[in-house]
Image (spheres, rainbow, N blue to C red):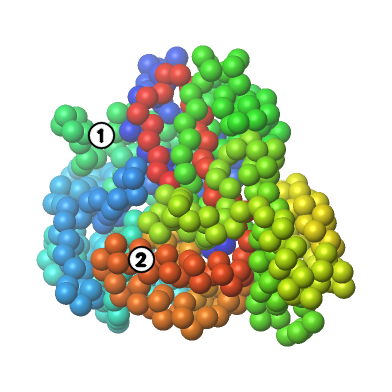
Amino acid sequence: MQRLFILCIACLLVCSCGKKDSNDDKKIFRYNESANISSLDPAFAKDQAMIWADLQLYNGLVELDKDLNIKPSIAKSWTISDNATLYRFFLRSDVRFHKSPLFNTPDSTRYLTAKDFVYSFKRIIDEKIASPGAWIFANVAADGFIAENDTTFVIKLRKPYAPFLGLLTMPYCSAVPQEVVEHYGEDFRRNPVGTGAFRFKIWKEGVKLVLVRNEDYFEQDQQGNRLPYLDAVSISFIIDKQSVFLEFIKGNIDFISGIDATYKDEILTRSGKLQAKYKDKINLSTESYLNTEYLGFLMDDNDKTNPLLNKQIRQAINFGFDRKKMMRYLRNNIGLAGGYGMIPKGLAGFDSTNVIYNYNPQKAKALLQEAGYPDGKGLPPITLATTAAYLDLCKYIQQELIQLGLNIKIDVNPPGALREQIAQAKSRWFRGSWIADYPDAENYLSLFYSRNFSPKGPNYTHFSDKRFDILYEQAQREPDLNRRTDLYKQMNSIVMEQSPVVVLYYDQVLRFSQKNIEGLESNP
């Protein structure tokens, strides 16, 4: 599955005290989704827009907390066999689906059972459904979903896979009711029924989506109060981000995530803080975001005259530009300058004490000389493929590397065209990013496993190293996180030494909310 350019795992928890609507005194949390939403069926929750909405409508076996720990949801507990291939989940008995006349019961609802997970997961791997989440269960044995009884659900794997529990936190793995899904068919996308804190009310596509409080929701806070606190979530679909910002400043939207270049300097200082005039008007919260931005090199180019096949040249590029200056002047210090490897800050395996690549023009020049190109002399032009959204970063790198004698050309492509070039291994040097699908560094290191060559897998650089592959396979079988983290660090060192990528930065999320919003949590 191609997951390189989509937004994934950014979690909006709306169990907070929202703004009261002036018309009906209800607590309604309002946010905008510029990217639109094409489906409310969790089988197609492939981007952030759908994920955020689906997290309000559905539950899975497990979920993530604000520190990326896996915690119970519908499964109140679980066991894993000694050989790490059998997962047994013990389900809550008090979880009910949202009300629907299709249940044909006196109260128009019913309790969830283990059979609902059997149906929901088999649906994900059904080729006729064509869910983009089918890859999650690629390692599940034939007939590997079993309902032992109403409250015991079993998954059998073909071979051990240590990060598997984390995969189950993805919205693809939500529980859906068979009778409702089969009644609506493809139109379940706009007639969702789940078990989540909010239930579907109305959706005028491209205009507004409203979710209202599920009075039967099973979760409670630590004081025993039934969740959620809010009466409703209202989602608008204004495309123009400048208009969204103006609506937020006027108080018509409670929350925006991220910042557009058009108003970046209006609201933030060069150091990434709120401008003085906004400090008393809005809240700003920041934290690590599991997204690594990088430049990738194609490592198995058939043209042996390609200078990028020379490791010393790739390393020279890594040493040849100032990432910290780039972050300060082009990103308002939003994010952490790269140089530590592919694993981003916020995941086990990231090592803040080990800067592998920092700005060192003398080292870069020495590497160029060792490669036979002193001061870049004799080195043919090198083309970097990117999109318009990242042109400023690429131009900055271009100017920095020109000072070393490198002749860098920039090729600007439409996003879809660049994705296709990268997937088909037709770009020698390209701008890419990877946003975590699940909270384990294995997700990032899978980009370098030799059996994951694109277009079938995420190894877009076609990196291949036997030492790395052995460690990667060992890590997949290792249940102990500390030992697995040591393996991740070894793999990260191999990748950085071989330099199939230039890590630019590790992203940071900015979340702006109105002053009356409290308790709004997120995770990386």
Can residue 183 be seen by looking at this rendering? no
Residue at position x 16%, y 56% in the image: 77
Q: Residue 513 carries which label?
A: none
Q: Which amino acid does label 2 sit on?
A: Asp
Left or right of residue 469: residue 409? right
Residue at position x 46%, y 51% in the image: 352
Mark 1 Cα shell of 10 Å, populated few (<14), some (14-19), many (≥20)? many
Q: Where is residue 221 in the image (x, y as percent from the top left)?
A: 21, 34
Relative to 24, does residue 503 appear above or below in the rendering? below
Nearest the eye: 356 or 3:
356
* Residue occupied by mark 2: 486
The quarter of the displayed image where residue 416 is located: bottom right
Residue at position x 20%, y 77% in the image: 83
Q: What residue type is labelled 1?
A: Leu
Helix or strand or loop: what does disc 2 sit on? helix
Nearest the eye: 108 or 487:
487
Left or right of residue 235: residue 320? right
Q: Where is residue 447 in the image (x, y as percent from the top left)?
A: 52, 69
Q: Position of residue 235 (x, y in %)?
A: 50, 35
The quarter of the displayed image where residue 220 is located: top left
Mark 2 Cα shell of 10 Å, populated few (<14), some (14-19), many (≥20)? some
Distance from disc 1 to disc 2, alpha carbons, whole Å, reads 39 Å
Relative to 51, does residue 242 appear above or below in the rendering? above
* Residue occupied by mark 1: 227
Relative to 128, does residue 292 appear above or below in the rendering? above
